[in-house]
Image (cartoon, grey):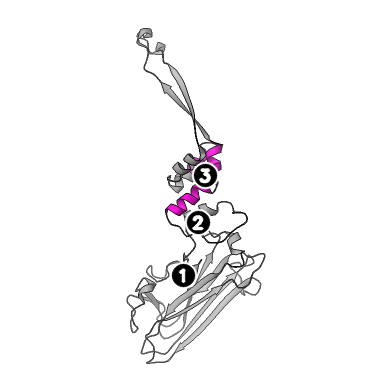
Amino acid sequence: MGSKISNLISSEPNAESNTGDSSEFDYTMSFVNFSIPDDLLIDILSYVPAEDLIKNCRLVCKDWKSIVDGHSVWKLKCKREKKCIPSISLRNIPNHYYEKIYIHDPYGKNLIQNPYGEEGLAKWVITRNRGDGFIIENPPAGAEPVPQEVGSQSCFATTYYPCMKHQLIDLLENGISEEILQVETTKIKIGEWFAARFDCASEYHLYVALLNENYHENITSFHDCLVDDFRFKYREEQWVGKEWHSVRSQLGKQRSPDLKPIFTKESATLNLK
């Protein structure tokens, strides 16, 4: 294809024709036309910031728009910055596939926002907050330090009555391609660390659900939109707790042709690979 560039060159005014009237200056104009090979242009554009590519470069001409809307530039950017690309073979690569990966970087990372409570209760919906309610502890009181692999000593803590929080994640808005979710081998990994105070008996519940396009905000039951879910319950007796436990599982064992990748979860961290 190649991209043609015209460069307008203006010479200095011709002194011999200069009569003192600037309107009579004699300029020599010439155009230099040349083409940049696609491979070279793709490599050059791959160093341009993403926002400039989308807002400016794709408006230059039809050829540039085609390149920016394609896969090659974004794939180069993903590989250069070591974005996680799913090791899944797709017969047809979805539109904007690598662009979404570069901008959102959604694979192989925790999609839960504010998972450790370092921003207080921001990003969470509190549905039950009894007793003294949710608090943030850093480090945790009455329990061992949070395992180093978690990456933070901050954690949510409750008191002597049940508390419940949840978070809703729309995978499409997070840059996950629907075609990836339709692949039978795609699994969504879920997991959370939890611990009890050594001087208190406690009960821990985790529920994670994968929902389809029938979900809406005012729904009262997941019956008509549930694709897959996971439940976990653990009870710790008084004077026994303080050790941290890890619960891990995965979603995606069932498949639905009208799957819309939306998650709801309560008290869990979530990783998608």
Q: Earlier in the sequence, mark 3 or mark 1?
A: 3
Residue depicted at x 55% and y 47% = 70
Report if the CB atoms under discs 3 and 1 are less than 8 Å apart. Answer: no
Three-letter amino acid code at disc 3?
Val
Disc on res. 41: none
Q: Secondary structure at mark 2?
A: helix
Q: Callout 1: 10 Å neighbours few (<14), some, many (20+)?
A: some
Residue 88: say if magenta: no
Which residue in the structure is indicated by mark 2?
A: 101
Chief SS of the magenta region = helix
Number of the front mark, 3 or 1: 3
Three-letter amino acid code at disc 1?
Trp
Is 13 positioned to the left or the right of 268 in the image? Answer: left
Evaluate whether residue 46 shows in this view.
yes
Q: Callout 2: 10 Å neighbours few (<14), some, many (20+)?
A: many
Disc on res. 68: 3
